[in-house]
Image: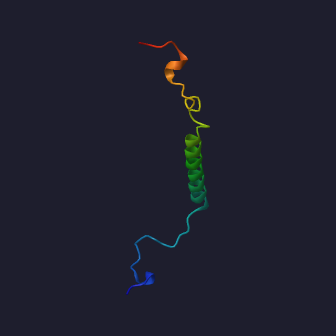
Amino acid sequence: MLGMSDLPSIPGSDDVPTPRWVKVLGIAAVVFVLAFVVLHLSARGFGHHMAAGHGASSHGPEQP
């Protein structure tokens, strides 16, 4: 049975740690996406004027 150390290494994959800026950018992206989803689902952020049941036609005269 092969262990992890017995597997052939991938060419060009040295044990180089991920740069700090990549980690920070990834964490910031995850936080931004989560905030967007939470605000969108809670109807407190994007499009909150539409959440009360007011359609686009309620802002002007109705068209037949």
**Residue found 54% across the figure and 25% down from its top:** 54
- Total numbered labels: 0
**Residue found 59% across the figure and 32% down from its top:** 48
Q: Is residue 31 left or right of residue 6?
A: right
From what the image shows, is residue 62 above or below residue 30? above
Q: Position of residue 7 (x, y in %)?
A: 40, 80
From what the image shows, is residue 63 above or below residue 15? above
Q: Which residue is more in the foreground, 23 or 13?
A: 23
Of all residues shown, which one is farthest toward the front? 53
Q: Which residue is more in the foreground, 62 or 18?
A: 62
Of all residues shown, which one is farthest toward the bottom? 1
Q: Which residue is more in the foreground, 15 or 61?
A: 61
Q: Position of residue 22 (x, y in %)?
A: 56, 58
Q: Position of residue 17 (x, y in %)?
A: 56, 68
Q: Quadrant of the N terminus?
A: bottom left
From what the image shows, is residue 2 above or below residue 38? below
**Residue found 51% across the figure and 73% down from its top:** 15
**Residue 53 location, quadrant:** top right
Q: Is residue 38 left or right of residue 9?
A: right
Q: Quadrant of the C terminus?
A: top left
**Residue 45 location, quadrant:** top right
Colouring of the image: rainbow
From what the image shows, is residue 4 above or below residue 31? below
**Residue found 40% across the figure and 73% down from its top:** 10
